[in-house]
Amino acid sequence: MKNLENKYLKLANECADVSGRIISKYFRKKIKIEVKPDNTPVTKADKESEKKIRDLITKKAPECGFFGEETGKLNVNNEYTWVIDPLDGTKSFVTGKPLFGTLIGLMKNNKPYLGILNQPILKERWVGIANNETRYNNVKVKTRNCKKLKGSKMYSTSPLMFIGKNQRVYKGVRAKIGETLFGADCYAHGLMALGFVDVLLEANLKPYDYIASVAIISGAGGKFTDWNGNDLNLDSDGRILAAGDPKIHKQLLKIIQKIK
């Protein structure tokens, strides 16, 4: 079993290397921006990166399932399934802002197991084994303790993602914390693992937006669940709560349940 897991870790890093070269080639270059049916942008950097990752995985780990943002699902009920976002933060990418990343997640029996967040422009890489350890550029990292909610640092991708009841939850949590920062996408997840961000609150995410990050943040000592405190998987509803300090996570869950 250990040999198999080492094989997957090596493969994940290889995927990060290859996709990083593709993304770097297109960064701050004039490339065509398409708009998908869900009104989000996509470029050939996204598409080429995912195709290369998928080709590598299907060749070197054909026993695994695959779920990618751009190419969809393949055998996702297998024991091991890769969950890939080739370019999380395409809006940042197309505006020349290096706060994006490639998310390479591996699930074992529908639970996050391994995660990589690769930022090729800044040459940063997070590698996490769920509830075990996380390394940033091959150095072990830990989330930080947070003494109180007020004044803690919270990130969300955008205030526009919170609609209806979800907006009430966002406003209620923000009122307890006092401030929210926006626009970092998965890069904020990496910052939590480094101990610079305390809370992440999101809605309307897809599995490829969070599976890798669950492994990274839990590996660094944080807690990452849905808004009901349930573990995340391919069937989760996309409303996520992460905290670097599990005690703060518990407090926030109580606040969310009262508002809901």
Image: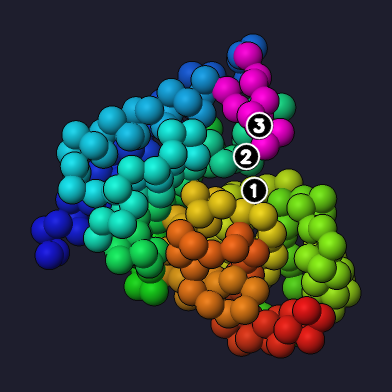
Q: Are marks 3 and 2 in contact (CB under 8 Å)?
A: no
Q: Which numbered disc, 1 or 3, marks the residue closer to the eye?
A: 3
- Left or right of 75? Residue 42 is right
Q: Where is the N terminus found, in terms of image quarters? A: bottom left
Q: Which residues are magenta?
A: 32-43
Q: Position of residue 162 (x, y in %)?
A: 79, 58
Give the residue displayed 65% in from the left and 64% down from the top.
239
Element class at badge 2: loop
Element class at badge 1: loop
Q: Quadrant of residue 19?
A: top left
Q: Amino acid at mark 3?
A: Pro
Question: What residue sits right under mark 1 in the picture?
Answer: 185
Q: Residues within 10 Å of mark 2 (few under 14, many from 20)?
A: many
> Which comes sooner in the sequence, label 2 or label 1?
2
Q: How many numbered tags mark residues here?
A: 3
- Left or right of 216? Residue 79 is left
The answer to whether residue 176 is above or below residue 2 is below
Q: Is residue 248 magenta?
A: no
| Residue 63 in view | yes
The answer to whether residue 18 is above or below residue 193 is above
Q: Amino acid at mark 1?
A: Asp
What is the distance, in whole Å, between disc 2 and disc 1 at their CAs? 6 Å
Give the residue displayed 82% in from the left and 54% down from the top.
159
What is the distance, in whole Å, between disc 3 and disc 2 at their CAs? 17 Å
Q: Residue 260 versus residue 85: which sits nearer the camera?
A: 260
Question: What residue sits right under mark 2 in the picture?
Answer: 89
Q: Are marks 2 and 1 in contact (CB under 8 Å)?
A: yes
> Which comes sooner in the sequence, label 3 or label 2?
3
Question: What residue sits right under mark 3 in the picture?
Answer: 37
Q: Residue 107 versus residue 249: which sits nearer the camera?
A: 107
Q: Position of residue 125 (x, y in %)?
A: 44, 47
